[in-house]
Image (tube, rainbow, N blue to C red):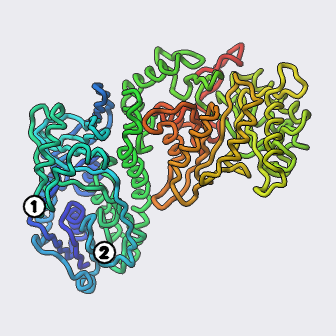
Amino acid sequence: MRIAVIGGGPGGLYFSALARQLDPRHEITVWERNAPDETFGFGVVLSDQALSGIERADPAVLSEMRPMLTRWDDIDVHYRGTTFTAGGNGFAAMSRAGLLLALQRRCAQLGIPVRHGSEATDVDALAADHDVVVAADGANSLVRERYAETFRPTVRTGTCRYIWLGTDLELDSFTFHVLDTPGGAAQVHAYPDARRTSTLILELSESAWHAAGFATATPPPLAPGESDERSIGIIAELCKDILNGQKLYGNNSRWLRFPTVRCDTWSRGNVVLIGDAAHTAHFSIGSGTKLAMEDALALARNLCEQPHTESALAAYEAERRPAIGSLQRAARASREWFENVDRYTHQEPQQFAVNLLTRSRRVSYTGLRRRDPGFTARAERWFADAAGGEAAGGEVRGEASPPMLQPFTLGRLELVNRVVASPDAGVPAHDGVPGDLELVHLGGAALGGAGLVLTGPVAVSATGGAGPGGAGLCSGEQAVGWRRVVDFVHTHSPAKIGVRLGHYGPAGSSESLGELRRAFAAAARRAAGAGPGAPDAAGFDLLELDCAHGSLGTSHGRLRHPLDVFDAIRAVWPDERPLGVRISPARWFPDEDGVDAVVRIANEFAARGATSVHVCAGRRADRDGYADPDAFADRIRNQAGGGSAFAVIASGSIPVSDVDTIVLAGRADLCVVDRPTMNSPWRFPRGTPDRATSHQWS
């Protein structure tokens, strides 16, 4: 093949070397507008896994790189005068200039001409004269712009400003510092890139950027290659305790906002995009250079293996797009975490460190434990102390129980752990009376180890059922049926049980608001009962008003009716028992974020006495990928950087394996788990004489 490569950065050079190695007959030419020694930026981070991939693909490339690599295992989080270190991460870095030099040498060894100082502007001519044109021309790709109608790119710019700097400070780990500034928190991302130098990135919100004086310090538009020296001086003062007398220096260093690039397709005819030209991921999740080199490997291999150019480009995109999509979703979560770091500055340092390390949702509590058992053991102990003691069963070999098995006090209700079982739909009930199926369903969830069991939808009126044959609390007979279920849970497990009350009929129901208020109040009385032994007392420990679905669903500010109904329930519900509300941001705001509105709604109910807010927000697609199921709960739990005055329950297809991470990081207090009785990691210990009070981790 005759192959033209536009862009002599790491992606373009690495592709060229791999393609020539796989087939020496290829005629490859690289066009690069900059000089050989002209590059911007500082350190490039590569994981141990990435380095292993490079070694497998071309050992000669890694041999060129190895003398310049500096390696570390630890990530240090500096916050409020504390330092928390998590090890076992396995990363290395080198200067970008050094990486380019290594790749240039490899291309020279393979006889690949690199035309430095030569910009390929006529892409159509190159495409007509070559079998393949590889566009590796970066995030501001001219090729992508030239064929925008085919690639259909979107570029979303982040809200934080950041600047990329070098320093003589010697580091032996990847380091995060959270700094107080007049306008809020700023974060420093720093890591070693050589034996005696490091890369330092300062990132801060727009308000903090202005308050720190950078807006007035920033000079008029800088010339190409020129750095913002006035800002560097302010940063040196801001970071003087970090720098410990060492210098900061720039290399085309200026304030930027990170652009997230996505394209609907990565090829047009025989023109194909790789690296930042096709996609970008925020620097806090990893190196764009790593992604470009992985793209290069996939493209070179598919050009070798596939019979035609068209099939090769299709196979390349099919292989890389899922991995890039997953990484971009993680990068979005990480970027948003740093953009909203002020939301978490109320957290204790240990929890803040866990939250930071798991911000992308790609690193979990289990992953942290595998990498550094000591770090997670200290976090577990802190969480156990903050929770007020060990979960039932105590310690195992001196270690605290996992976070999800720590107790929690919901109002005045003591829960043995943070796991909630709550079916999204009810089971068939004859005349609305719960029977054996309901008992098996909810009783099994309690026996499976959940600390709290919530019913499925329970109707407050005959016309407001969730569906034909659904359960209700409209009569004494139905209350007696529920009492049987409640008694089973209380007798055979330490779990508590709550009822989800709602009106699930059409929005245009014939019932007036006054009738609805009376129906909810009557159902609430039956749910609690007038007292022990009352004939129609179901005896539930908790009541949850379901505003997530049905006619009580509240969106775009239509909150008066649900609040009126909540007040009617509160007037009759016992003060000592928790009263919560279930809301559904994804249903109310299908075409928008809706986070600010959801926080306001949660606060409205809290002001009326809600003990808990159950955020039902399943994983859903949006224009940027997928929203994590705990994202809305996280925002409510950590609203305005001050924590929440009520308990937050997260739900939305959350696997049991994620609960430890969510509660330890402070994104929610309790989690509704997906299929709680299947493959549960908790059980009754063998030989326990009184299983109702002896749940243990084993």
Task: From the viewer's perspective, tell me whether residue 575 is left or right of residue 381.
Answer: right
Examine the rendering and report whether any part of residue 681 can be seen. yes
Please state which of residues 147 and 480 is positioned toward the viewer in this rendering: 480
Point out residue 424 in the picture as x, y percentages from the top left corner. Answer: 70, 45
The secondary element bearing badge 2 is classed as helix
Residue at the location (16% across, 75% down)? Answer: 119
Q: Mark 1: which amino acid?
A: Glu
Side of 388 relative to 88 (left or right): right
Q: Which residue is mark 2?
A: 145
Q: Counting other residues with Cα less than 10 Å from the Cα at mark 2, is it few (<14), some (14-19), or many (20 or more)?
A: some
Q: Residue 621, percent across and down?
A: 53, 58
Q: 10 Å neighbourhood of mark 1: few (<14), some, or many (≥20)? A: few
The residue lying toward the viewer, choosing from 399 and 519, is 519
Q: Say if 670 sits above or below 34 in the image.
A: above
Secondary-structure class at tag 1: loop
Q: Is residue 22 visible?
A: no
Q: Which residue is mark 1?
A: 38
Which residue sits at x=41%, y=30%? 347
Q: Dividing the picture into quarters, in which one does residue 648 lie?
A: top right
